[in-house]
Image (cartoon, rainbow, N blue to C red):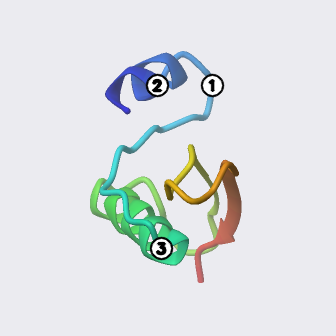
């Protein structure tokens, strides 16, 4: 959410991006990475942590995913 993004901005090295949500975790992660690339936050070799709350009403799990940009 925008509220969570504002709170994360105070942490050093955190560049929060709010993107579209989808019940499919792969689609949501892809949307987050695309949004970060579009803002110029992600470049080749960067390590990115994608955090999301429950993506599907059928799931009680939060998502934390580590990605290295090729």
> Counting other residues with Cα less than 10 Å from the Cα at mark 2, is it few (<14), some (14-19), or many (20 or more)?
few
Q: Residue at the spot x=69%, y=61% of the render?
A: 65
Q: Is residue 19 above or below residue 66?
A: above
Q: Position of residue 5 (x, y in %)?
A: 43, 29
Contact, mark 3 vs mark 1 (Cβ under 8 Å): no
Q: Is residue 50 above or below residue 53?
A: below
Task: Between label 3 and label 1, give the one nearer the viewer.
Answer: 3
The residue where tag 2 is placed is: 4
Label 3 with label 2: CB-CB less than 8 Å: no
Give the position of the N terminus as an image quadrant: top left
> Would you say 63 lies left or right of 18 here?
right
Which label sits on residue 12?
1
Between 10 and 2, which is closer to the camera in this rendering?
2
> Does 34 sit above or below residue 64?
below
Q: Would you name the residue on which mark 3 appears? A: 24
Q: Does label 3 or label 2 sit earlier along the sequence?
A: 2
User: In percent of the image, x 53 and y 69: which residue is there?
Assistant: 25
* Mark 1 neighbour density, 10 Å: few (under 14) some (14–19) many (20 or more): few
Q: Secondary structure at mark 3?
A: loop
Q: Earlier in the sequence, mark 2 or mark 1?
A: 2
Given this view, does label 3 or label 2 mark the residue nearer the observer? 3
Name the disc covering residue 34, or none. Answer: none
Please give the name of the residue rendered at 56% of the width and 43% of the height, measured from the top-left corner: 53
- Residue 21 in picture, x, y percent from top left: 36, 57
């Amino acid at each position: 959410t925008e509220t969570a993004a504002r709170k994360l901005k105070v942490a050093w090295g955190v560049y929060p991006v709010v993107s579209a949500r989808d019940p499919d975790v792969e689609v949501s992660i892809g949307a987050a990475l695309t949004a970060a690339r579009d803002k110029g936050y992600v470049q080749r070799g960067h390590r990115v942590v994608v955090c999301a709350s429950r993506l599907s009403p059928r799931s009680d799990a939060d998502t934390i995913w580590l990605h290295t940009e090729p």
